[in-house]
Image (cartoon, rainbow, N blue to C red):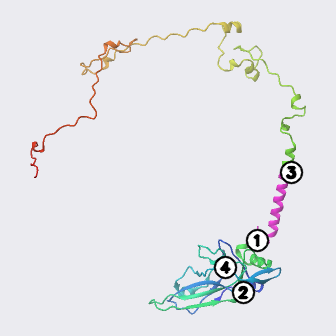
Amino acid sequence: MSLENSELWKRFSGIGTEMIITKAGRRMFPQLKVSVTGLDPEAKYLLLVDVVPVGGSRYKWHGKKWEASGKAELPPPDRVYIHPDSPASGAHWMRQPVSFHRLKLTNNTLDPHGHLIVHSMHRYQPRVHVVGAGGRRGAGGGCASFTFPETQFLTVTAYQNPQITQMKIESNPFAKGFRENGMNSKREREARIKRKMKINECEANQGESESKKGPCDSTLTEEGPLEQQPPPALPQPSCSFYPAAGINLNGAEAYVQHPAAFHGLRGPSSPYESPSQEIAAPPSSPPTKPPPEQTDFRAMLPASWPSLDMVPFLASAEPPEASSFSPFKFSFAPYPPPPRVYGPPSGYPGSQPPML
């Protein structure tokens, strides 16, 4: 087994590789990527990864380097990461490099997702294991473990060494936004902070200038304060249906003076000479409608209905007297109905005598 990106690992190891860990789990960078040879092409194998603590100390960053600062915590629960392609044939593993880019590190000791559990500010060493799962007949097995010293790393919740931060920004393809021309670069972040501060300052100045104004400043005019301005004079309305001569019937003044003329109350010509006569005129009585013609509907019935007793109330002016109708008779049956008594079973034809 050989480490694919060993040169990148050696660059980070020369400074002191740091790996971010979170409760939800964080992937490693550089990635763990290996090549395997010498396997039986037809046999089945599993590839596993675990991390083991290095030394018995807890570490702390002191300005320029890492130093031991106490005894290490108790080791977390042992876990292994199984490659998703496992089990697979030896030919599958030897066909191309094997990447463990989905492996995640967490500091949650109760993690339910199967991530590798580690403690912060500790040093760890990854190990890769090749486990045989049987040959063509299901026999065989064995295990081989491989370690690469340049893959050791220190676990942190935030990068301590600024050189490591810069190297990861330059090397990680998923950190393009943090580069010099990226959206998350230091220059862009500072520019965004300045713009935000400027916007907040403008909003504060605008709010301060508005607070100095009174609640009625917008209603004041250049001529003088509101209380010194006389109210506008309104024309006196008239109850007359007909406006005076010389008034524009389409204007607002005409509606104020003669509102009735705008609601269809003006006739073609007035029979009165003055408004007083118009008001004093008695109302005309409404015209009376002639009574509707009475129709005998019996003539419209079919000839086969001569025996029907027709009630003589056919659109007459007054209904017939109540004495002309025969009274309606009601009959009530007891509820529930009384039970019906049937004879003995022998009384029905075909019945058999009871068995004794």
Dominant secondary structure, magenta: helix
Alpha-carbon neighbours of circle 4 within 10 Å: few (<14), some, or many (≥20)? many
Report how far apart the C-alphas of labels 1 and 3 lie in the structure: 34 Å
Q: Which mark is residue 205?
A: 3
Looking at numbered disc 4 in the image, what kind of residue is underneath it?
Val
Report how far apart the C-alphas of labels 4 and 3 lie in the structure: 51 Å
Looking at numbered disc 3 in the image, what kind of residue is underneath it?
Asn
Query: In the rendered view, would you say 322 is above or below 45?
Result: above
Report how far apart the C-alphas of labels 1 and 4 lie in the structure: 27 Å
Between disc 4 and disc 3, the foreground one is 4
- Queried whether the magenta region covers residue 199, the answer comes back as yes
Tag count: 4
Task: Read off the residue under disc 2.
Answer: 7
Residue found 25% across the figure and 21% down from its top: 305
Task: Read off the residue under disc 1.
Answer: 178
Report how far apart the C-alphas of labels 4 and 2 lie in the structure: 25 Å
Q: Secondary structure at mark 1?
A: helix
Of 3 and 112, nearer the camera is 112
Residue 338 vs residue 250: left or right?
left
Q: Residue 28 appears at what percent x and percent y?
A: 67, 78
Q: State which region is magenta.
A: 176-203
